[in-house]
Amino acid sequence: MATDPNRVIVFDTTLRDGEQSPGCSMNLHEKLEIAHALKELGVDVIEAGFPIASPGDFEAVQEIARRVEGPIICGLARCNTADIDRAAAAVKDAARPRVHVFLATSAIHREFKLKMSREEIIRRAVEGVKRARDQIEDVEFSPEDASRTELDFLAEVVEKAIEAGATTLNIPDTVGYAVPSHYAAIIRHLKQHVRGIEKCVLSVHCHNDLGLAVANTLAALHEGARQVECTINGIGERAGNTALEEVVMAMRTRQDYYGLNTGINTKLLFPMSRKLSHVTGMTVQRNKAIVGQNAFAHESGIHQDGMLKERSTYEIMRPEDVGISRTELVLGKHSGRHALRQRISDLGYHLTDEQLNKVFDSFKQLADRKKEVYDADIEALAESQMQVGQSNLWSLAGFTSTAGTGSQTSAAVALKHRDGRILRDAASGNGPIDALFAAIDRVTGTELKVVDYRVRAVTQDIDAQGEAYVEVEHNGKRLSARAVSVDVVEASALAYLEVINRVAARQTRDRLKPTDDIPHEVVPPVT
């Protein structure tokens, strides 16, 4: 892809590995929005999903392949016929399609998961790469759990994969076991002992179980790897993946040391982080590097004094370089549709005319209730439209809630079913939110275990919109949603209802999942 030997290819797997984070599932509209934003950010490859997992996953990968032009669109597949054919079918309409094939190689995976010999692993890897290459020219191969694989066997497998036609060779630290010197040694060994490796792009995919994902990635890049697999905000299975914003800014800030560059528009890093956080409901910790709330905050008197004298005394990056703006455009009730459309576009959102009309109506209502409408308010309105699926089972028609000292707390709700019926019920509880959720459960016939519930102000005004975040557990899986309103009780009801809609959608997808006898587990392990 890149002729510049110092150009690092950024492979984003937020929509695949990142979505495997508990509670981070996204609907089709949200995935498309994130994919468009990743394109604008400048990523080179978007791993859009695991097409064999469900009809919904296949549709999402296919729609991204058809509608997002520019980056390579990649689908993940295990080394079996059904997976590979499904992935190829999902990405074939992309201008630049890729199939990413993986197979575990470590002794522990060979013995306990796959129950295969070394010879069988090599045969299956070669067959998988060849089958993918017969359908899609660009094929990536990953030996899963590479960092715990014997070096001689790892070199043998990847050499055979290259001979079979792999164009990118990815070396995953699947369980975050490696440390920088160890991981760098693996890359160095492969470059020295694998014939034909110079024909491939050497890629790295690290997990953060020991907090070393970014450090391991940078060590591998220093040894000559030229594709980095990462996610926005570092989301992903367990402790997450290499954080895109961290590894990109490390290369940029320490250009003197690494001498590497990317095609990322770093000024979009902070907006991209916020967008994903809002879509998934997974908030970024305050002290998160690059995009955390405290990343450019200075409270120490000594630090403040140094900053006032010379910024570089305590800041190695400028906030503006990652998209943290010092100013904010304020809109009011007299602002027109064109100004709102432009501001939504500037904030990085892609709404249809119908969605824009609904946002404009909500904006006017909000402007009547608030003196000033800030960027964060506009983002919240835009995101609320992204969360509205075309086939939501339930919507909120109305509610009442009563609470007070010495009185019983109760709530009543009216919900509209997809078929047009209005259903009503009431319940009491330990507080207005508990009563409201109980009433919704009675109407929908759903019983969910709430494992996390939070509310916060979207902006700092006294009349700010409130954002509610709800995370639930259902059948051993966690799902989350968020919603905004100037009424935090209403926001809570909307968020809880969105979770119920996601549970219903997941149940529908599960009923439609393919029933073919596919070897190994249906949900892909993390590469």
Image (tube, helix red, strand yellow):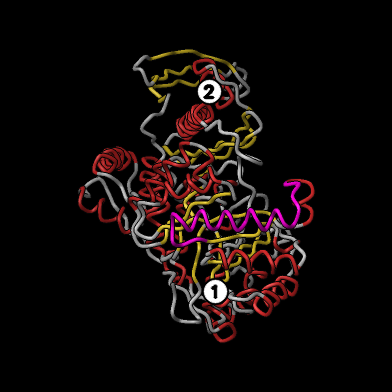
Q: Is residue 384 left or right of residue 122?
A: left
**Residue 59 falls inside the magenta stretch:** no
Res. 489 visible in picture: no
Is label 1 in a helix, a strand or a loop?
Answer: loop
Residue lying at 42% horizontally and 37% vertically, measured from the top left: 485
Q: Residues within 10 Å of mark 1 (few under 14, many from 20)?
A: many
Residue on which disc 2 sits? 436
Q: How crowded is mark 2: few (under 14 residues within 10 Å), some or many (20 or more)?
A: many
Residue lying at 51% horizontally and 20% vertically, measured from the top left: 440
Is label 2 in a helix, a strand or a loop?
Answer: helix
Q: Which amino acid does label 2 sit on?
A: Leu
Q: Where is residue 277 in the image (x, y as percent from the top left)?
A: 51, 50
Q: Label 1 to label 2, Cα distance in Å?
A: 52 Å
**Residue 118 falls inside the magenta stretch:** yes
Front one among 94 and 259: 94
Front one among 354 and 294: 354
Res. 50 visible in picture: yes
Q: In this view, does 119 lie to the left or right of 299?
A: right
Camera-side mark, 1 or 2: 1
Q: Is residue 464 depicted above or below 123 in this figure? A: above
Q: Is residue 490 depicted above or below 264 in this figure? A: above
Q: Which mark is residue 226?
A: 1
Q: Where is residue 97 in the image (x, y as percent from the top left)?
A: 41, 57
Q: Which of marks 1 and 2 is nearer the N terminus?
A: 1
Res 480 quadrant in image: top right
Residue lying at 62% horizontally and 65% vertically, measured from the top left: 160
Q: Which mark is residue 22?
A: none
Q: Is residue 312 depicted above or below 472 in this figure? A: below
Q: What residue type is labelled 1?
A: Arg
Front one among 36 and 353: 36
Quadrant of the snapshot with the C terminus: bottom right
Task: Give, as a single range, the part of the protein colored magenta.
Answer: 114-139
